[in-house]
C-alpha cells in the first residue's frame, strides 16, 4: 500500500469526533485506507454492498449497540440510508457512557447523497474528509510524469504497463457510464454519456458554453447541466468558478471545466503513452488541469479556488483565496523555461495578490520577476499542505 497523505489526518479526526465521513470516487483507495486504519484500531468492517453484511444489520440498532466499544467501518453507507438515524441515536447513547470519539467511519462514493444523509442525522457529530486519487506528494518525485499520464487511481498508476493502465481506465469509465451515472437517476444511453465525457476531455480547462455543448450532443441545456451535476457529484468533474472582482473591467463569468483525473482525460482521448501525450493538442490543458487539481487538494480548509479572466485578455489560471483574505495567484506553464504571460502581469496589476507563482515541470524554485516565483508543483503543494496540517492562519505576504 502506498502511504496516503490523508491517513494521519483521518486518524486524528477519529480521535476527536464520534463519526468521520470519508468520501471520494470509486477505486480511489477509501477501503484500503480505512482497513489500514481499522487494523491499527481493532475496527469492525462491514461492506454494505455485500448481502451477508447487510443481513447482519437486519436489526441495526441491536447489532451495532453490541459494538459501541470499538470503531465500526461502514463501507458504501449510502446503500442503507435508514442507518443514519440509528447512528445518531447510538452516538448519543455512547456519549452518555463517556465515549465521545472513534465510533464510526463511514465510506461513500456519492458526494451529495452521503453528505445530505449525514448532515440531516449527524449534525454536530460528524467530520468530513475527501480522499482523492494519488498525488505528487504520495509518489516518488521521479514518477511525476507517469502520474500525470496515468492519473492517480492506484490500479491505473501501479499497472505493469501503460497498455494495462489504459485498459483499466477504459473499464473504469465504462462502469461509470453504464452503472454509476444511471444510478443517480440518469436515463441517457451509455454511448451518449461516453460522448459527453469525450467532449469534456477535448474541452479540458475551457469555460462552459452550455448551449454549444448541448447542441453538439443533440440535447437540451437543462439535461446537459444535470449530467454535469452528476459528474461533479461522482468526483469526476470540477467546475472552477470565476473570481468576481470590482476592477471596472468586463469579466468572464462562466466556470471552467476540468475532468479531475488526468489519466481519465488521456483515456477518453486515446492517449496511450508519454510520447503520444506530448504530441497531442491537449497537452497544455491537461498539464494545467493536473496542476490546478493537485493544488486544490492540498489547500487549507476553507480556502477557495477560482480563475480570473477579463475580455481584454488578463488571466490567472488559479486564484487561491484563504480564510484570512490572503490571495495567491498561480499561472501554469508546460515549459522548462517558464515566462509569465502578458495577461498574467495584467491580472496581477488588477488584483494585487499577496503572492504569485508560475508552476512549471522543473526541479527548483527561483524568482522570475519581483514578487513572482517559478516553482515545481510538488514544492508548492508541500507549502500548502504544511499550512493545511499545521493549522496555520498566517500567510506570507509575498512569494518567498
Image (spheres, rainbow, N blue to C red):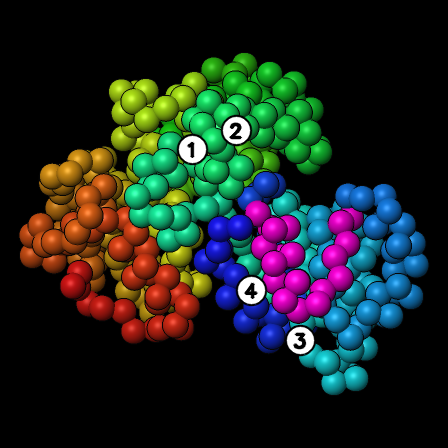
Query: Is residue 98 something one can see in this rendering?
Result: yes
Along the polypeptide, which appears first: circle 1 or circle 2?
Answer: 1
The residue tagged 2 is 169
Looking at the figure, which quarter contains the C terminus?
bottom left
Which mark is drawn over residue 113? none
Which mark is drawn over residue 101? 3
The residue tagged 4 is 10
Say which of marks 1 and 3 sits in front: 1
Q: Are marks 2 and 4 in contact (CB under 8 Å)?
A: no
In the displayed structure, 290 sits above or below 6; it is above
Along the polypeptide, which appears first: circle 2 or circle 4?
Answer: 4
User: Label 1, label 2: how many angstroms apart (C-alpha)?
Assistant: 8 Å
Q: Is residue 347 left or right of residue 67?
A: left
User: Label 3, label 4: how many angstroms apart (C-alpha)?
Assistant: 12 Å
The residue tagged 1 is 150
Q: What is the secondary structure assignment of the residue under circle 2?
A: helix
User: Label 2, label 4: how many angstroms apart (C-alpha)?
Assistant: 27 Å
Q: What is the secondary structure assignment of the residue under circle 4?
A: helix
Indicate yes or no whether the magenta region holds residue 40.
Answer: yes
Magenta range: 29-48
Q: Are marks 3 and 4 in contact (CB under 8 Å)?
A: no
Q: Position of residue 119 (x, y in %)?
A: 67, 61
Q: Position of residue 26 (x, y in %)?
A: 61, 41
User: Label 2, label 3: how many angstroms apart (C-alpha)?
Assistant: 38 Å
Q: Main secondary structure of the magenta part?
A: helix
Name the residue rendered at 22%, 35% in the picture. 334
Along the polypeptide, which appears first: circle 3 or circle 4?
Answer: 4
Name the residue rendered at 43%, 18% in the picture. 270
Along the polypeptide, which appears first: circle 4 or circle 1?
Answer: 4
User: Label 1, label 3: how many angstroms apart (C-alpha)?
Assistant: 38 Å
Amino acid at each position: 500500500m502506498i502511504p496516503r497523505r490523508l491517513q494521519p489526518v483521518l486518524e486524528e479526526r477519529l480521535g476527536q469526533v464520534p463519526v468521520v465521513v470519508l468520501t471520494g470516487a470509486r477505486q480511489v483507495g477509501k477501503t484500503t485506507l480505512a482497513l489500514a486504519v481499522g487494523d491499527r484500531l481493532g475496527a469492525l468492517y462491514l461492506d454494505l454492498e455485500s448481502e451477508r453484511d447487510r443481513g447482519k444489520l437486519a436489526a441495526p440498532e441491536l447489532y451495532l449497540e453490541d459494538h459501541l466499544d470499538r470503531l465500526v467501518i461502514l463501507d458504501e453507507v449510502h446503500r442503507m440510508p435508514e442507518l443514519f438515524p440509528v447512528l445518531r441515536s447510538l452516538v448519543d447513547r455512547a456519549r452518555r457512557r463517556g465515549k465521545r470519539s472513534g465510533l464510526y467511519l463511514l465510506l461513500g462514493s456519492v458526494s451529495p447523497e452521503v453528505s445530505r444523509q449525514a448532515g440531516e442525522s449527524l449534525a454536530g457529530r460528524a467530520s468530513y474528509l475527501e480522499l482523492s486519487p494519488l498525488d505528487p506528494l504520495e509518489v516518488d518525485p521521479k514518477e511525476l510524469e507517469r502520474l500525470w499520464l496515468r492519473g492517480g487511481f492506484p490500479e491505473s498508476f501501479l499497472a505493469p504497463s501503460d497498455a494495462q493502465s489504459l485498459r483499466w481506465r477504459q473499464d473504469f469509465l465504462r462502469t461509470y457510464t453504464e452503472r454509476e451515472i444511471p444510478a443517480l437517476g440518469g436515463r441517457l444511453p451509455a454511448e451518449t454519456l461516453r460522448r459527453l465525457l469525450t467532449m469534456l476531455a477535448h474541452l479540458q480547462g475551457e469555460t462552459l458554453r452550455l448551449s454549444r455543448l448541448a447542441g453538439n450532443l443533440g440535447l437540451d441545456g437543462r439535461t446537459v447541466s444535470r449530467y454535469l451535476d452528476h459528474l461533479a457529484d461522482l468526483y469526476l468533474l470540477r467546475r472552477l468558478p470565476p473570481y468576481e472582482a470590482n476592477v471596472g473591467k468586463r469579466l468572464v463569468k462562466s466556470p471552467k471545466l476540468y475532468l479531475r483525473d488526468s489519466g481519465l482525460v488521456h483515456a477518453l482521448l486515446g492517449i496511450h503513452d508519454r510520447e503520444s501525450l506530448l504530441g497531442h493538442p491537449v497537452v497544455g490543458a491537461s498539464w494545467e488541469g493536473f496542476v490546478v487539481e493537485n493544488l486544490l487538494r492540498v489547500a487549507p480548509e476553507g480556502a477557495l479556488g477560482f480563475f480570473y479572466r477579463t475580455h481584454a485578455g488578463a488571466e490567472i489560471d488559479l486564484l487561491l483565496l484563504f480564510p484570512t483574505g490572503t490571495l495567491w495567484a498561480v499561472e501554469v506553464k508546460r515549459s522548462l523555461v517558464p515566462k509569465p504571460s502578458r495577461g498574467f502581469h495584467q491580472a496581477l496589476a488588477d488584483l494585487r495578490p499577496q503572492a504569485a507563482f508560475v508552476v512549471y515541470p522543473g526541479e527548483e524554485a527561483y524568482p522570475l520577476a519581483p514578487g513572482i516565483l517559478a516553482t515545481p508543483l510538488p514544492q508548492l503543494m508541500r507549502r500548502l499542505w504544511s499550512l493545511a496540517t499545521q493549522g496555520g492562519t498566517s500567510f506570507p505576504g509575498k512569494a518567498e
